[in-house]
Image (tube, coloured by chain):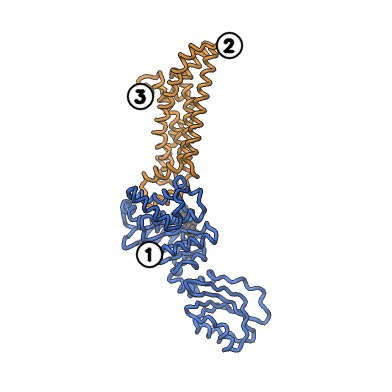
Chain colours: A orange, B blue
Amino acid sequence: MEWDWKTIGKLLPTATEQTLHMVGLATVFTVLIGLPLGVVLYMTSRGGLWANRYVNGILGFVVNIGRSLPFIILMIAIIPFTRLVVGTSLGPSAAVVPLSVGAIPFFARLVETSLREIDRGKIDAAIVMGSSYRQIITKVLVRESLPGIIAGLTTSVIALISYSAMAGTIGGGGLGFLAKSRGYDRFQTDVMIATVVVIIIIVQLVQIIGDVLARKLNHR
Amino acid sequence: MITLSSLRKVYPVAGGEIVALDTVDLEVGRGAIFGVVGPSGAGKSTLVRCLAMLDRPTSGKIIVNDEDFTSTSARKLRRARHRIGMVFQHVNLLENRTAAKNVSYPLEIAGVPAAARQKRVAELLALVGLADRGGSYPAQLSGGQKQRVGIARALANDPDVLLCDEPTSALDPTTTAEILTLLKDLRDRLGVTIIIITHEMSVVKQVCDHVAVLEAGRIAYSGPLLDVIGDPDSGMASALLPLPAAGTPTAGRRSITVTFSSAKSPADFVSTLARRFDVDIAIEAASVEPVQGNSLGRLRLGLDHEVDPAPIVEYLQELGLWVEAA
Ligand SMILES: Nc1ncnc2c1ncn2[C@@H]1O[C@H](COP(=O)(O)OP(=O)(O)O)[C@@H](O)[C@H]1O
Ligand SMILES: [Mg+2]
């Protein structure tokens, strides 16, 4: 097999950068919205400090819809929404919208699951010491379950990388687009292999960073 | 110091309600170590959750230091909470904070500046004998050490009351004794009022000076420990000083069980009794323990069948002993 390093050298860095751009921004939105959403899901659940059957039921329903749709369908279904937010449905920036919408409910459930592991006694102790809800959430709930939340975020980011490749094939750009347009459409196997290697490296790095961070933060 | 008046807590359940606390009246004096005992299901946990204001009582008042906890606003309640420190059976430390940071938590909440916090944390850790373990995480501490950190944390804001919910129930006997000694020492040095909720009679025996017996949501008995023990109906004497079960009764003997406290009765009553009535007395079982600087004991005495027990019982009662039905 011929290795066309010139083409790879021209296309791969741009595609990698686009993928990192999509996944990076989507990760930021996933944390900014998914973390509070996970906390609210936990706080409003039965026996929680803000126990509310209706709020919890509605949020849970919406989150489950987000989680039950295969990403490729979700992405197509929300194209009008994406156009509304970004002005276009093409390109890496536009892909951030469906990526975030897909990852937020996923991450929120993982956050909720991590919070459930916290012993109720710790929350009681925080209340007795006079903590406000805000202090309970930041200093007790989120801090105590941070290792689990980081592990959940790692899983979510890796899912985002996988979603981003799908988004790429229908106009998002990035490594997924490169693999399809060159590797599949033009039979450039060398480009294909190079893409695969870069994705594997990115996923491995994310997993390693996530593991190290979670371990560092965990003192149990 | 603490007054509970007509405290009631009713839990609604499917098809009715459960009265967990039924008009509880209780007075706890300043500087007391007050034990609350009772069988499982008596309402101990409910009482402690009401006292800690984790649950709102259905009716009645909780007055701490002249402040009515039951009618304060949520905002004031958070401040009032600094008047009460709480120690838990499972300690409930934050596992991702060091011992020092755990003790620091209530100070952070109360808005104490960082420098003052650090100084106070060092004082508190020294107070509970863990001056050198501030940097350890809970997972690196033993059960007893964790509970010491829990006690230091509870004392951080100089509370008037230390509320201890089964503080030693998860600890072995040696560590239990150490923690109880620490609590007593803290009461002596700081003058803090301590309430201990427990199902362990040995805890009451070791540290409490006052006790309340909770039964089916009501205070069945309460008062100074020796008074409650001396009340034959309270069942405290047999609970605190259990005697081995009587074997097959020796032919021709009858048993009488007596309880005595060195505060009230002469310690040598057995020999006095023998001389006075000219009888032989067998000691079938005995349990004698120091309680609050007194020697407290329960004996099962064996008398010959021929002997009429009535005047003997009468004499023992005159001496201040309590005689259980034979
Ligand atoms: N949240 C609750 N809902 C319904 N019933 C309860 C609840 N908590 C306690 N109870 C009932 O109240 C009574 C007292 O319980 P509790 O205070 O836990 O007793 P203790 O701690 O002395 O074992 C029990 O009959 C128990 O079943
Ligand atoms: Mg209980």
How far is disc 1 from disc 3 in space, using C-alphas? Answer: 64 Å
Which class describes the residues within 10 Å of circle 3: few (<14), some (14-19), or many (20+)?
few
Front-most of residues B74 and B106: B106
Q: Residue at x 47, y 53 (%)?
A: B91
Which numbered circle lies on residue A1?
2
Front-most of residues B311 and A193: A193
Which numbered circle lies on residue B191?
1
Q: Quadrant of the N terminus of chain B?
A: bottom left
Look at the numbered discs 1 and 3 and tell me whether their residues touch, using CB distance below 8 Å. no
Residue B180 lies, with reference to residue B314, above or below; the image says: above
* Residue situated furthest right in the rendering: B251
Local secondary structure at mark 1: loop
Q: Residue at x 53, y 69 (%)?
A: B239
Which class describes the residues within 10 Å of circle 1: few (<14), some (14-19), or many (20+)?
some
Q: Is residue A50 left or right of residue A216?
A: left
Q: How many marks?
A: 3
Residue B199's spot in the image, x, y percent? 51, 62
Q: Residue A101 is drawn in which quadrant? A: top left
Residue A194's spot in the image, x, y percent? 52, 18
Which numbered circle lies on residue A85?
3
Q: Name the amino acid type tagged 2.
A: Met
How far is disc 3 from disc 2 in space, using C-alphas? Answer: 44 Å
Front-most of residues B316 and B157: B157
Look at the numbered discs 3 and 2 and tell me whether their residues touch, using CB distance below 8 Å. no
Residue B214 lies, with reference to residue B121, above or below; the image says: below
